[in-house]
Image (tube, rainbow, N blue to C red):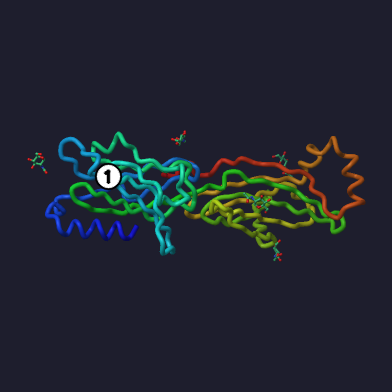
Amino acid sequence: MFQILTMLLLETHLSMVSALFTVEVPQQQYVVEYGTNVTMECRFPVNGSLSLELLTVVWQQKRQGQSKSKEVYMLRNGKPFLQSQHHDYIGRTALLHSELKLGRAILQITSVKVTDGGSYLCLIEYQGVDYKYVTLEVKAFYRKINTQVIRKPAEDKFVFMCQSEGFPLAEVFWQNEEKLNLSGSANTTYTVTTDGLYNVTSLLTFKPSMSENYSCVFWNKELNGETSAHISTSDRKRKLNPNLENEKRDDFNSQTEALYLSTVTTSRDSESVAL
Ligand SMILES: *[C@@H]1O[C@H](CO)[C@@H](O)[C@H](O)[C@H]1NC(C)=O
Ligand SMILES: *[C@@H]1O[C@H](CO)[C@@H](O)[C@H](O)[C@H]1NC(C)=O
Ligand SMILES: *[C@@H]1O[C@H](CO)[C@@H](O)[C@H](O)[C@H]1NC(C)=O
Ligand SMILES: *[C@@H]1O[C@H](CO)[C@@H](O)[C@H](O)[C@H]1NC(C)=O
Ligand SMILES: *[C@@H]1O[C@H](CO)[C@@H](O)[C@H](O)[C@H]1NC(C)=O
């Protein structure tokens, strides 16, 4: 790809039209949510009707801290040229052809991943050559929090688990109904999924007490808000009634017992975050 860039720039130096040809971006930065579609735009001058066969458009992406850029989409002499497209983008990109005659090179990426974030180069050759950069930032809210309660009868302890995926990395806070911060006794770990999301698991171990309602809060400054799930030691009575006999037997047989699993789809505190 570097060769194409160098070649095109060299070509431009030799032609006098270059000074007239400028690529512009109506929007410099795009912030989108994981899994959505995004369109990013570059504009170039078209005088009269577009001669498609003279048009070359190249979109490339580079993530922060990575030295190599990936080819996202290429239109060469008016035709899609996807041989050198990076495999991360196969089947997920398009250039909106109907917009080209208006001098708009609009790249669409569907089902945006965390790894799509970064700096995008948009290079256009059309009786001249120029390029600009736009940036794409991807956010993933910790919307769905999976919770689990595990009882350790031998130690007379409960373990509450909250697990969720998002980006960037969230901190997890725990509190009881008196709003007492219990995060000190929690163990929060994370892994990174193949999609680049943080898979955050937080475990709170405690002895049963008067307080029976607990909540875990996933918080990240950049996400401008938090999500939370509530767990109660009393839920088990309700949820496990049909299996009460099994539960009693298990008390004697196992050290650790998963009392119930549940998934909480949370609402965020500040839904009005501007994307
Ligand atoms: C994203 O784009 C794909 C392909 O064009 C389309 O099928 C899908 O409905 C779009 N999703 C949204 C949320 O617009
Ligand atoms: C547009 O094209 C016409 C004729 O093809 C030419 O006379 C004119 O100078 C061009 N304008 C620009 C801005 O290139
Ligand atoms: C937290 O959990 C991890 C993995 O389960 C474990 O290796 C680590 O020792 C724990 N840390 C504390 C402070 O309990
Ligand atoms: C996230 O981690 C949990 C274990 O902590 C695992 O069960 C789950 O499959 C992981 N999810 C993904 C999407 O990797
Ligand atoms: C825990 O929450 C439930 C449901 O929200 C409520 O009915 C119950 O009174 C709470 N328990 C305490 C000890 O406040």
Q: Residue 134: x percent and y percent?
A: 33, 52
Q: Residue at x 31, y 36 (%)?
A: 97
Indicate the secondary structure of the residue bearing disc 1: loop
Task: State which quadrant residue 152 falls in.
Answer: bottom right
Neighbours of disc 1 within 10 Å: few (<14), some (14-19), many (20+):
some
Quadrant containing the N terminus in the rendered view: bottom left
Residue occupying the point 83% across, 53% down: 256
Taking the image as shown, residue 139 lies to the left or right of residue 80, namely: right
Residue 108 left/right relative to 20: right
Quarter-of-image position of residue 186: bottom right
Q: Can residue 26 be seen in the rendering of this structure?
A: no
Give the residue pinned by disc 1: 77
* Of residues 148 and 23, the one drawn nearer to the viewer in this rendering: 23
| Residue at x 57%, y 47% (from the top left corner) | 142
**Does residue 233 appear left or right of residue 179 in this picture?**
right
Q: Is residue 128 visible?
A: yes
What is the x, y in percent for residue 54?
Answer: 22, 44
What's under tag 1, amino acid-wise?
Asn
- Residue 118, x across and y down, in percent: 41, 55
Considering depth in this image, is 135 or 228 the residue closer to the camera? 135
Q: Is residue 14 above or below residue 242?
A: below
Q: Is mark 1 within 8 Å of ligand 2?
A: no
Count the marks. Answer: 1
Q: Where's the C terminus, which quadrant? A: top left
* Residue 100 rendering spot, x and y as whole percentages: 27, 38
